[in-house]
Image (spheres, rainbow, N blue to C red):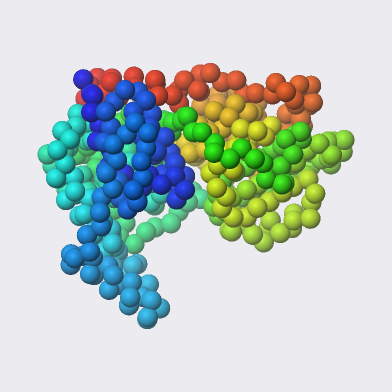
Amino acid sequence: MIKKILVVVDSINIEDSSGSKANVVFIQNLAEAGFEVLVYHYTRMNIKLKGVSCYSIPEIKYSPLYFLSRLQRVLQRHLKVNFNPYLEGFFGFSFTFFNDTKIISKALKKNIFLPDLILTLSKGASFRPHYAVLQIPEFHDKWMAYVHDPYPFHYYPRPYNWIEPGYKQKEDFFRKVSLKSSYSVFPSQLLKEWMGSYFPNFIKNGIVIPHQNGNYIIQDKSFPDYFDSSKFNILHAGNLMQERSPKGLIEGFMLFLKQNPEAKKESKLILVGNASDHSEMLKGYGNEPEIYIYNGNIAFDVAYNLQKNVSVNVILESKSEISPFLPAKFPHCVEANKKIISLAPYYSETRRLLGNDYPYWAEVDEVDKIAAIITSLFKLWKQNPVNFFLNREDLINYLSADYLKRTILDLKNIN
């Protein structure tokens, strides 16, 4: 019976990335599910989580690897040359990566928690906790490796097709993770299948635990000046990478207004979040009164409060044949209980979960279909704006601490 869980994670600072937000909710739901949880994190900040014991792994500043990593930074700053591509091409990883993972490994070897399960969580392009635990063979029979995205980068589906320096060493690292971990866990079924096509053992030992719904309490419920809660508001909150263009969404919204001129006074499209890769395109819509665009980071409190109070939330993904990712915002949008417009490939985890017959799905560049979806939603909102909800109890349960608990307790049945 699994009772005690040691979680190893890069960061538990929810303001530094969507990955950290997702990890914190995962950790809190483990505690809510009744497990005794100890978190070893490398945030280098004293952060406390309710119901969870947290230990901030201190940085060691007197090792050869620390000296090499800092020497590299000083040389780069003065010579204005980025040495990382050359170093990673030879070693596979940076000196900073090796230093950080060694520090994490040393800290873990000293722990006296005696867990029943050791869970390594990842974020962004960092799998430092996985590399650290890989160096501790006595942990492997209790090790659950969480894989949030494809890794290495060249295993991303198109249009994400970047090949990293040191990709061969990174492949070897992850092959070892797939073979040495007792369990692997993925936030989506499609991601498990995708990564299993490269590392077959992930199919054998893999399970699916989605990003979690949490009981986040909004500290400041005031609305920003650009938000009028009485309107038909469509929101996309979050970063828009180069591969995720909002152009189809904006053009679809503009077409909706053209086809439904009576909706102009009552409708607004709101885009908030870093979209620097699309800055020039977005400038072309800066004078549209029915569109608000903020190209920059906003506090999580603000974004979450907006998601809970708009009429429709948008989950926007890239133009591709497949999207195996479960967006970190998906649980927030489900919990907000507002209608969702899914702009994703036909084969996507978001579409799989919403259902093949979900009516508010389109490819990201299908302008006519997007306009038709917005028109349909607007007409429904006009009929009953007070009771305009998603109402998906199946998804709420799937993203819950109860489902998480059942999945963890059932681990013995997959090995």
Residue 208 place in picture, x, y as percent:
37, 29
- Residue sitting at the far right: 262
- Residue sitting at the far bottom: 79
Q: Is residue 331 above or below residue 177?
A: above
Is residue 10 visible from the viewing direction of this image? Answer: no
Is residue 64 visible from the viewing direction of this image? Answer: yes
- Quarter of the image containing the C terminus? top left
Picture residue at 19% right of the left edge, 65% below the top: 62
Picture residue at 63% right of the left edge, 28% below the top: 338
- Quarter of the image containing the N terminus? top left
Residue 98 place in picture, x, y as percent:
24, 58
- Residue sitting at the far left: 138
Picture residue at 44% right of the left edge, 44% below the top: 14
Residue 59 place in picture, x, y as percent:
25, 57
Nearest the viewer among 63 and 345 is 63
Q: Horizontally, is 135 left or right of 247 in the view?
A: left
Picture residue at 69% right of the left edge, 38% below the top: 234
Nearest the viewer among 365 and 118 is 118
Q: Horizontally, is 409 left or right of 334 in the view?
A: left
Residue 298 place in picture, x, y as percent:
57, 50
